[in-house]
Amino acid sequence: MRVPEQYVRAGKLAREMREWILENVSVPQTCLEIATSIEAEIARRGGQPAFPTGIGINGVTAHYAPQEDDQTKIGAGDLVKIDYGVHFDGYIADTAVTMTENDEYQQLMETTKRALEAAISVVKRDPRTGEIGKAIEATARQAGFKTINNLSGHTLEQYTVHAGKSIPNVYAPNQPMLKRDDVFAIEPFLTLGTAAGYVVDAPPSSAVTIYSLIMRKRTAVKELDALVDHVWNARKSLPFTPRWFSKEFGRERLQKLLSELERRRIVRGYPTLVEASNAPVAQFEHTMKLEGNSLVILT
Ligand SMILES: [Co+2]
């Protein structure tokens, strides 16, 4: 199977966006400003966001997409993760960068980048996902850091961000192999050696900000069906954030409809994930593909 050309386009735009982010994101922008400007720039360049732009400050590790009322600013002391994606026709490039002006976090950030490089050099010669995790873990440990052991990389399929296989950030025996033509993301998350080293759901009081449609099912409730149709047309099974649809549905009403669709198992919510001891976490991520014996880094 040849790589759909859309993967290459998505990867190229994600790579160009990385440069844009490194040049344009700075203290003291708000998380909301950062996320909306990234998504607008992706669209301006002809792409679509593959999922809501995630902004993770310090211990906030994944699945946090700012909403309209979020006034949080990134500060000079913060460790800031930006996890974003681009898709063309559902073919996804998923990538992440960490930024900081804080000297205390430089080493954590650099080590995380090196862990991703170590993982990439392993996957070129050994497709066992457990061995990739082992290289990430070893790189972290040698520098006195820890990996987040319950977050992992993943294979990607059309309109599916997390397809069948996981690529752990720790050694794990009996893991599946990556095979020829798999498209996958490797994403080491590293934290301090003294940290818990795993993530938990943020307290239920903090709202879920990322959702996806599980199935396109009729409910016989007009306004629920209207939302499902709207999401399906805009996103199919790709993740979305309420901010994208609040104009059409109204913020409060949208929240109610989403809760009801979640209760009916038509929509899935992804709670924000925070490091269990609230220690700072760094992340880097690339999407890549095994083509025969060579590895193509798409992002
Ligand atoms: Co990912």
Image (cartoon, rainbow, N blue to C red):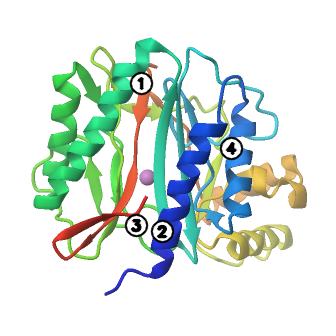
Q: Which residue is mark 1?
A: 276
Kindly identify the residue that appears in the image at 41 percent across and 37 percent down. 283
Pointer 3 local density, CA inside 10 Å: few below 14, some 14–19, many at least 20: many
As shown in the figure, which amino acid type bears the numbered disc 2?
Thr
Q: Nearer the viewer, mark 2 or mark 1?
A: 2
Q: Which residue is mark 4?
A: 35
Q: For residue 140, which quarter of the picture?
A: top left
Q: Which residue is mark 2?
A: 160
Against 186, residue 290 (above or below) is below
Does residue 198 appear left or right of residue 219 in this picture? left
Mark 1: secondary structure? loop
Residue 51 appears in the figure = yes
Against 11, residue 27 (above or below) is above
Q: Quadrant of the N terminus?
A: bottom left
In the image, residue 208 lies at what x, y percent?
64, 43
State how far apart marks 4 and 3 are (Cα): 22 Å
Q: Are marks 2 and 3 in contact (CB under 8 Å)?
A: yes
As shown in the figure, which amino acid type bears the numbered disc 3?
Leu
Mark 2: secondary structure? loop
Q: Quadrant of the C terminus?
A: bottom left
State how far apart marks 1 and 4 are (Cα): 25 Å
Residue 277 appears in the figure = no
Furthest-bottom residue in view? 1
As shown in the figure, which amino acid type bears the numbered disc 1?
Ala
Q: Are marks 4 and 3 in contact (CB under 8 Å)?
A: no
